[in-house]
Amino acid sequence: MTAWEQNYEELVAELRRNALLESCGSVLGWERETYMPEGGTELRSRQLSLLAGLRHQWSTSPRLGELLRSLASEDLGPADGPVAVNVRQACRDYDLATRLPQKLVEEISRVTALSQHAWQQAKKQNRFADFEPWLKQVVSLKREQAACLHAGKSGPVYDSLLDLYEPGVTTAEIQATFAPLREQLVPLVGRLAEASSKPDASLLAREYPIEQQRVLAREAAQAIGFDFRRGRIDESAHPFCSGFGPGDCRLTTRYDAHFFSMAFFGTLHEAGHGMYEQGLPEESFGLGMGHSVSLGIHESQSRMWENLVGRSRPFWQHFLPLARNQFPEALGDVETETFYRAINKVEPSWIRVEADEVTYNLHIMLRFELEQKLIGGELEPADVPGAWNEVFQQYLGITPPDDARGCLQDVHWSAGLIGYFPTYALGNIYASQFYRAAERELGDLSALFARGEFSPLRQWLNTNIHQRGQQYTAGELVRVVTGESFSALPLVEYLENKFNDVYCLT
Amino acid sequence: MTAWEQNYEELVAELRRNALLESCGSVLGWERETYMPEGGTELRSRQLSLLAGLRHQWSTSPRLGELLRSLASEDLGPADGPVAVNVRQACRDYDLATRLPQKLVEEISRVTALSQHAWQQAKKQNRFADFEPWLKQVVSLKREQAACLHAGKSGPVYDSLLDLYEPGVTTAEIQATFAPLREQLVPLVGRLAEASSKPDASLLAREYPIEQQRVLAREAAQAIGFDFRRGRIDESAHPFCSGFGPGDCRLTTRYDAHFFSMAFFGTLHEAGHGMYEQGLPEESFGLGMGHSVSLGIHESQSRMWENLVGRSRPFWQHFLPLARNQFPEALGDVETETFYRAINKVEPSWIRVEADEVTYNLHIMLRFELEQKLIGGELEPADVPGAWNEVFQQYLGITPPDDARGCLQDVHWSAGLIGYFPTYALGNIYASQFYRAAERELGDLSALFARGEFSPLRQWLNTNIHQRGQQYTAGELVRVVTGESFSALPLVEYLENKFNDVYCLT
């Protein structure tokens, strides 16, 4: 074994150990959201802070730096080969980690644990004032973090928060994509509002007993390919997916007996994330080749299964009979076309996670605007409710009736996830590009879905995306997989075609 | 602040940090038994091994050694004062930890995680042969561990495994207690078997729907004082209690729709453990003053609530109406006295955790015999089934029909818990001594129980036992609380009185 091979082997062992420690924190984080009793809040926040601090210490160890510096000067083979990819990603992670003081990392972990708890209470009681001091603390810590990450770089500091979730993407690039997208979506929403034949979504508010919803959601996740031997689904206030590591991936959802869509499409969404995690090469756990590309690419998987598949007509040609088995009273008299139109009703609404495919992106743009201002210091946390309602009115033409259905609806800011929201809209854009490429290669997917055959698409995603880990950046991956560069055009075309059809405007 | 005060403060910070790390492992261990999917086995065992190794590293750090050596030479106040207690316990833990090489600790953690999984499968399929190679590995590792712990000490090495769970108690002392106890229990079992009026336990095998069992078990745990704001109850293959730390204590149980006793008394049992954990002084988390005395004392709490309270006549005078609400079909026609006799039927049976109060201790004595021989090298793991059945026949007069109901029934050996079983019988002995002292001080507990008043006993236990942490050893605590020395006599008297009455032999 040569010297660099020895160094590489040592690097791999260190990285795996760090990933293993991180995965311990994932279990604790998941458990906090699913089963932990009220009284455990303080202890859990201290546990997570201890692990986060330790993780930070390990990922900034001088030995890791030595190994990386020595490997960086070697010829590691092709840039998209596994060794080069793993070293490149490790260098990136090391650079990011060493920019942050240990104290700050521990403080962010400690405060966001408590702040999420405060957010949950504040949302329940619709009291923004109770959450405001926490938001203030979080924003202040995130500004401090952004400053550390951005030292020596140009452009807005917000770029450095974005980069944590969508490596290499800038504020300017997102603005350049979002602005024209908004100019096409707003009129589309308007046209649909004026259509003479509108879907009736009231059937989704009939009685759907929760026990049966559980069965159906599980059936759907299993049908599209989520592996329950290597994962499970539980309940939490805010749905999420957490891939602990090889062999163990957790989804959560939430149920409302009078709203069909929430749990069902929420589960498809999280299962999309879950299949990405389950599809990563297990032997590369802890390494770049075993890690998802970015949150945007992650979201492309969840949104594809939730919307491009799960809200398609052929999906329900197959699935409605199964849903009728569970809900004979609510769905016994409902035709496929009626149901398909109901789940695709476009209408400005308050809650992002329940928004239709067209208005969804406007919810993201709003958050993107406010986040930049919070981090730039142009918006005070205390002024968030007002700013939220103002931009909401401007983008969606309505005003939230209260903060619980306004700026308190999402867990993200309380958890310190600032710079994260834009990846949701990027995910929609990537999803349309990937889906178009999949159809070019696999032929008519509709016919397959109508027969309940989802594995050709899943396998295509596995080969083209999941198995590649971080071999490419998001932009490169789009080009490699689709032969085209990043563009919102396929998303706009998909939305125009689909909703003109749903609203009988063709 | 004086130099020793500074050292003490540093020691406390170190110990709290170690306890916090250990508590992370507790969450992962609990989750493995309750929710983890099959596919997560390998990853979880690596996570636990990482944490165990790290924990070992921290608890053997040279700095900790320095602090303890320097503090040991100071005047730390009275021997049962908090500072002296905390330092003494820390010295003990440090001595135990430094006797074990890191590699061995990690290996034990790794192997027992996998071995528990193998045990579960082997038990399910009634195949001892599948478990045997794992038992061999575990025994070999435990012998290695015992040798390290016993270096420089006299007596059997098994003493040093016992000492891990019941500090200071020796094999000889347990033998000296168990032998005469067995000589009194075996004839009692025989007398009861020949009684003309025997309880009929068949009503416990009626249909008890699991959902209602859940409600009742929760009601019972709450009634005796387990705090669900600071804990919860879930299901696992083998019931246990895990106190994560201040504010968070978990119980597990298991349900059988055709066996009332399992979940109900199992829950009372675990809630007894849980109330001890919830009753420890929170401000002393990580320190001797915040830790339970020993497993035997822990078991005295669980067995007291399960048996001395939960299987008493007055308990059911209060609780049977509540049980009838949940199970009108199974219990509608059952009188208190009939029910009381049913749950107190004495009969040799195969499964320890379902055994009655009299035969239970014989199950423990059997395990104590075999463990000593496994560790002494006089019994090969392959010969365990034969030896088990032989001693079982000798003590209980029956032979298990298969290994699943024989030597495969308990999780302990697969988990590396050798030297642990004797503490269960010690718990029964302590419980009888404590209960007698409580009755002396509080007066007639029966009248309170019949009115559903359990808090006087719980508060007495809290003041006399829980709040004292490790202020005293088990033997000292018995003397301080009861004014008497350790003795199995109160247990024998309790059993004779109770079962002569239940069997109408008085």
Image: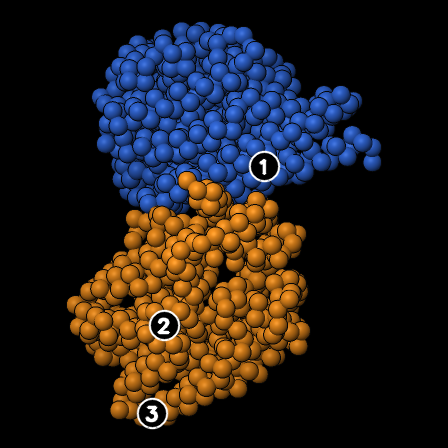
Chain colours: A blue, B orange
Identify the residue shown where x is 40% and y is 66%: B297
Q: Which mark is residue B479?
A: 2
Looking at the image, tell me whether mark 2 or mark 3 is earlier in sequence order: 3
Q: Quadrant of the C terminus of chain B?
A: bottom left
Nearer to us of marks 2 and 3 is: 2
Q: Is residue A432 left or right of residue B144?
A: left
Marks 2, 3 in one chain: yes
Query: In the image, residue A422 lies at what x, y percent?
Result: 45, 18
Nearer to us of marks 2 and 1 is: 2
- The relative height of residue A351 versus residue B425 in the rendered view (above or below) is above
Q: Which residue is mark 3?
A: B195
Secondary structure category for the residue under label 1? helix
Q: Which residue is mark 1?
A: A19
- The relative height of residue B324 versus residue B74 in the rendered view (above or below) is below
Chain letter belonging to callout 2: B
Marks 2 and 3 in Cβ contact (< 8 Å): no
